[in-house]
Structures are given as C-alpha cells and as structure tokens.
Amino acid sequence: MTPEFGSPTHREADDDAHTSTVVHVSGEIDLHHAGELENLITTALSDAQPSTKIVVDLSNSSFCDSAGLNALIRAREAALRTGHTLSLAAPSHQMLRLLELTGTAALFPLQPAVDS
C-alpha cells in the first residue's frame, strides 16, 4: 500500500493553550517512503511557532519498518533541537511492538487518535 502523507494541519490542543501541528499518515512507512515522512515533519517543524507540539497521526498507517522508525527518531531529534515535542497518535499494534523491541518506546509520547 502506498502511503499518503497529508499536509500538516494546525489545531488548538484540548489540554492547554498550545498549538498542535498534526501530520496525517496513511499506509506503510517503509524504506521507500520514510524520507517523504521525514521531509513532511521537517517542514512542519520549520513552519511551527515555538512550543508547538508536532503530532504524527498514525491511525491510518498499517506498517512501519526500521527505516520508518529511524526517520521518526531523526524527526524527534530535530523537534527537540527546535524546542518542540514530537508525539505519535494512535500507533498500530505493530508499531507499538517495533518501539518495544527496539527500546525506543520511551522516546515518543503516545496519545489516542487525533480528532479530525
């Protein structure tokens, strides 16, 4: 399945006064598509105001391999360098297992699905 990466959307977070930028992902995040996701998150970071939370909505993503995970880790590091946080929304069971097996689960705040 070919992923579809939507343009980042901005919305007010429900829990506080900070703005969240949501990056919607659909399909597989694999070797062939990880760079596209990383570029989209990098763009979202460069467009974001200070303290904006970057949320990667994985509710429609079916698979992530090591290339996809590495792209997310690099994006997280970029987010931290620029004063942002990067969280994962609605990761699949497979994604949760990948995070657990690689010891990277603690790197990403997790949250439920993002309201559309």
Image (cartoon, grey):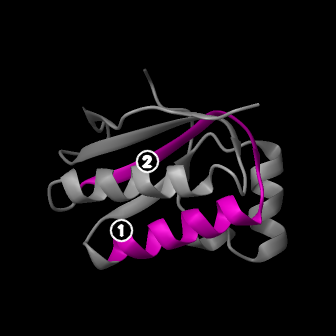
Residue 12 in percent (x, y) is at 24, 35
Q: Amino acid at mark 1?
A: Ala
Report the front residue among 34 and 56: 34
The single residue placed furthest to the top in the displayed view is: 116
Identify the residue at horizontal 49%, vertical 58% (top origin): 38
Residue at figure coordinates x 75%, y 66% from the top left: 66
- For residue 79, the mark is 1
User: Does residue 10 sit above or below 97 in this rendering?
Assistant: above
The residue range painted magenta reads 52-80
Would you say residue 22 sits in the magenta stretch? no
Q: Residues within 10 Å of mark 1 (few under 14, many from 20)?
A: many
All told, the count of numbered labels is 2
User: From the image, which quarter does the C terminus lie in?
Assistant: top left
Q: Quarter of the image holding residue 39? A: bottom left
Question: Is 24 located above or below residue 86 in the figure?
Answer: above
Return the disc, 1 or 2, that comes first in the chain's sequence.
2
In the rendered image, which residue does mark 2 sit on? 55
Which amino acid type is marked by label 2?
A: Val
Callout 2: SS: strand
Q: What secondary structure is marked by label 1?
A: helix
Classify residue 42 by image quadrant: bottom left
Q: Residue at x 44, y 31 (%)?
A: 6
The residue that appears at 61% across and 55% down in the rendered structure is: 34
The N terminus lies in which quarter of the figure? top right
Place of residue 9 in the rendered image (x, y in percent of width and height, measured from the top left): 31, 33
Residue count near mark 2 (Cα–Cα under 10 Å), binned few <14, some 14–19, many ≥20: many
**Vertical position of residue 84 compared to residue 111: above or below:** below
Q: Quadrant of residue 17?
A: top left
